[in-house]
Amino acid sequence: MSPAGRPTITNRRARHDFEILTRYEAGIELKGSEVKSVREGKVDLSGSYCRFRDGELFLIGATIAPYDKASTHESYDPHRPRKLLLHRRELNRLEQAVSQRGLTIVPLKMYFKGHLVKVEIALARGKKIYDKREAIKKREFERRASRIKAR
């Protein structure tokens, strides 16, 4: 939970599968009941990614569960692509990096900033299996070293 009691939804899988190069903060286009679901923390970012369509960036694969108390005549697809809001200059920079260098854009966090929902996205490069093993070995070594120091 953030200091204001609002949840910060993280994508822990992204840090395991990708090497994070650059981070950006983006707004997200949501419907009213989706905002209430985010406020309750009913969001799953694992397995989600960002894609360009007609010069605009969309969050694909994220699940925002329907709000329980919302009216029944206004429902939405919980898995629908959602438009991310960035400055044109940032969009051009990201689109160029993705097309030329073979990088990808993954969401890291979804959180509230004031009354607005923000998504922290990152330009990332996929890790190879041996890179993941090295990261696990390093983490285990540091954990053992801290335990020995604590004695």
Image (cartoon, rainbow, N blue to C red):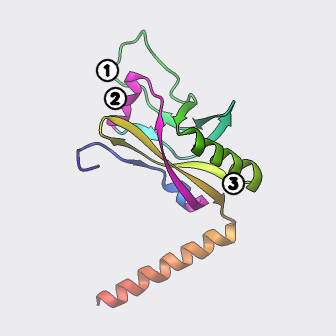
* Residue underneath mark 2: 36
**What is the tally of numbered marks visible in this picture?**
3
Q: Earlier in the sequence, mark 2 or mark 1?
A: 2
Q: Residue at x 58, y 45 (%)?
A: 90
Q: Residue 24 magenta-drawn?
A: yes
Above-or-below relation of 97 to 114 = below
| Drawn side of residue 10 relative to residue 99, left or right | left
Closest to the observer: 93 or 82?
93
Q: Are marks 3 and 1 in contact (CB under 8 Å)?
A: no
Badge 2 crowding class, 10 Å Cα cut-off, few under 14, some 14 to 19, many 20 or more, is: some
Q: Indicate the position of residue 137 as horizontal and vertical percent values.
A: 55, 78
Residue that mark 1 sits on = 69
Q: Which residue is mark 3?
A: 103
- Quadrant of the rendering where the C terminus is positioned: bottom left
Disc 1 is placed on an element classified as loop
**x 31%, y 35%: residue:** 115
Q: In this rendering, would 146 be left or right of 140?
A: left
* Label 2 close to label 1 by CB (< 8 Å): yes
Type of amino acid at the residue the image marks with label 1 = Lys
First of labels 3, 1 by sequence position: 1
Give, as a single range, the part of the protein colored magenta.
16-40
